[in-house]
Amino acid sequence: MEMVRELFLYMRIRRKFWLLPVLIMVTVFGTLAVLTQGTAVAPFIYTLF
């Protein structure tokens, strides 16, 4: 969790707010990949891409 805190501090101090949408999308896709691995929902997720 310290890494996440440091990342947000970096974005706030350096004014790199454009990184926030990128991090949100990476988190969403990562969570989606973890949750659908080995479930019955996986074939439906593959059709989205």
Image (cartoon, rainbow, N blue to C red):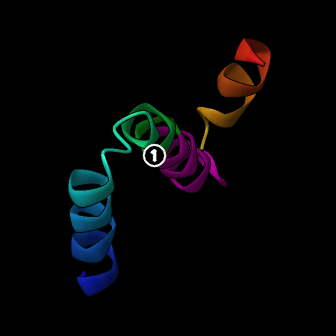
* Helix, strand or loop for disc 1: helix
Camera-nearest residue between 30 and 1: 1
Residue drawn 56% across the image and 51% down it:
30
Q: Position of residue 22 (x, y in %)?
A: 51, 37
Magenta segment boundaries in residue numbering: 26-38
Residue drawn 78% across the image and 19% down it:
49
Q: Amino acid at mark 1?
A: Leu
Q: Which residue occupies the extreme front position in the image?
A: 14
**Is residue 35 part of the magenta span, yes or no?**
yes
Q: Residues within 10 Å of mark 1 (few under 14, many from 20)?
A: few
Q: Position of residue 17 (x, y in %)?
A: 34, 38
Q: Which residue occupies the extreme top position in the image?
A: 48
Camera-nearest residue between 38 and 35: 35
Q: Which residue is mark 1?
A: 23
| Quadrant of residue 11 within the rendered picture | bottom left
Image mark count: 1
Residue drawn 21% across the image and 72% down it:
5
Q: Quadrant of the N terminus?
A: bottom left
Query: Magenta span: helix, strand or loop, mainly?
Result: helix
Camera-nearest residue between 14 and 17: 14
* Rendered view: 25 above or below 35: above
